[in-house]
Image (tube, rainbow, N blue to C red):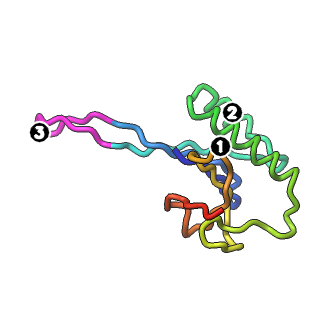
């Protein structure tokens, strides 16, 4: 599972994979199907009510809600004058917040390192 905030679209994007059983030519197999939920974040930092109603019963929505509250906490505590740096390469432009499942914290990654498994050098 991965959670990230896309600042351009103002959406939290939650992606995960789930196993799907398939039968092809009488042979059974399992494939990993990629799934995604996106939830709009208003300018005041709250999740969009329409998206809340649509996704509130989904098991991944609790993670999205927690991620949003963590982002709001970070935005209220930190000054954005310096900006944020990519945790992998140190780039300052084009970085977005990403929830690292291993450390259970928010790290900032550039577009180049979003798909990679983040290796934080801290």
Name the residue tied to disc 2: 52
Name the residue tied to disc 3: 25
Q: Is disc 2 placed on a helix, strand or loop?
A: helix
Which residue sits at x=76%, y=48%? 71
Do the residues under discs 3 and 1 have CB atoms within 8 angstroms? no
Q: Is disc 3 placed on a helix, strand or loop?
A: loop
Q: Earlier in the sequence, mark 3 or mark 1?
A: 3
Which residue sits at x=60%, y=67%? 88
Which residue sits at x=55%, y=48%? 2
Q: Is residue 36 magenta?
A: no
Name the foreground residue: 80 vs 52: 80
Do the residues under discs 1 and 2 have CB atoms within 8 angstroms? yes
**Horizontal relation, residue 31 to residue 23: left or right:** right
Q: Is residue 21 magenta?
A: yes
Do the residues under discs 3 and 2 have CB atoms within 8 angstroms? no
Name the foreground residue: 87 vs 43: 87
Locate the C terminus and report the quarter of the image it occupies.
Answer: bottom right
Q: Earlier in the sequence, mark 3 or mark 2?
A: 3
Q: Earlier in the sequence, mark 1 or mark 2?
A: 1
| Residue 39 badge | 1
Q: Position of residue 97 (x, y in %)?
A: 68, 56
Q: Position of residue 104 (x, y in %)?
A: 63, 44
Q: Position of residue 111 (x, y in %)?
A: 58, 67
Asked where in the image residue 94 lies, by quadrant, the reply is: bottom right
Asked if 29 appears above or below 110 in the picture, the reply is above
Residue that protrudes farthest toward the top in the picture: 57
Q: Position of residue 102 (x, y in %)?
A: 56, 47
| Residue 56 badge | none
The CA span between labels 3 and 1 is 39 Å
Q: Which residues are magenta?
A: 20-31
């Amino acid at each position: 599972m991965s959670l990230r905030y896309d600042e351009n679209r103002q959406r939290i994007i939650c992606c995960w994979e789930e196993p799907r059983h398939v039968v092809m030519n009488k042979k059974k197999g399992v494939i990993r199907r990629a799934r995604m939920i996106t939830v709009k974040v208003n300018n005041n930092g709250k999740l969009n009510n329409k998206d809340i109603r649509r996704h509130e019963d989904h098991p991944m929505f609790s993670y999205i809600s927690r991620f949003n509250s963590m982002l709001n906490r970070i935005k209220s505590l930190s000054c954005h004058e310096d900006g944020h740096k990519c945790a992998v390469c140190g780039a300052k432009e084009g970085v977005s917040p990403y929830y690292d499942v291993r450390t259970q914290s928010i790290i900032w990654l550039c577009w180049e390192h979003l798909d990679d498994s983040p290796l934080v050098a801290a």
